Amino acid sequence: MSSKTGGIHRKRNKALGVLELVAIALGGMIGGGIFTVLGISVAMIGILTPIAFLVGGLLAILAVYSYIKLAVYYQDEGATYAFFKRTFPHSDFAAALIGWWVIFGYISTLALYAYTFASYAISGFDFASNEWIRKAVALFIIA
């Protein structure tokens, strides 16, 4: 036990490996994707939804393969910004744009998850179709 935090500190025996990192990525992608996109996909493309998910999965596999190759090449567990910056070290403006796009992507994803969860959270109430209440619940979730 640590006297400062009151928690138990365990020494990590090994770093996260490929299987652990793939599991974390798949958990986030599949969990978030099904949670937010499945209903919209069925409403928009109906019976073609499994094909859309299959195509999305194949694209994700290509992205994962690229990130693995970059991580091995640079001996770095960085992500889009870090790999771009190391590949093009003299492109500061482009690297900054990449960084801001990544931030925008995370914020957009967070907003989508919060909005979808708000829709589910109020679905049993009479005001479930009220767009302003749904947005207010989403803001509350983010806060």
Image (cartoon, rainbow, N blue to C red):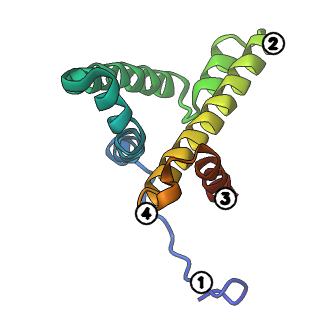
Determine which quarter of the picture holds residue 69.
top left
Q: Are marks 2 and 1 in contact (CB under 8 Å)?
A: no
In-front residue for pair 37/95: 37
Instruction: Report how far apart the C-alphas of labels 3 and 2 lie in the structure.
Output: 35 Å
> In the structure shown, which secondary structural element does the residue marked by tag 4 occupy?
loop
Residue 17 vertical position relative to residue 75 in the rendered view, above or below: below
Return the residue at label 1.
7
Instruction: For mark 2, give the secondary structure.
Output: helix
**Residue that numbered label 3 is attached to:** 140
Tell me where residue 124 appears, x and y as whole percent: 41, 61
Work out whether residue 22 or residue 55 is closer to the camera in this orientation and state it.
55
Q: CA distance from mark 1 to mark 4?
A: 18 Å
Give whichever of 84, 74 is nearer the camera. 84
SS assignment at label 1: loop
Q: Which mark is residue 93?
A: 2
Name the residue located 34 percent from the left edge and 37 percent from the top edge: 39
Q: Dot 4 corresponds to which residue?
A: 13
Disc 4 from disc 3: Cα separation? 39 Å
The three-letter code of the residue at mark 1 reads Gly
**Residue at point 62%, 58% (across, down):** 141
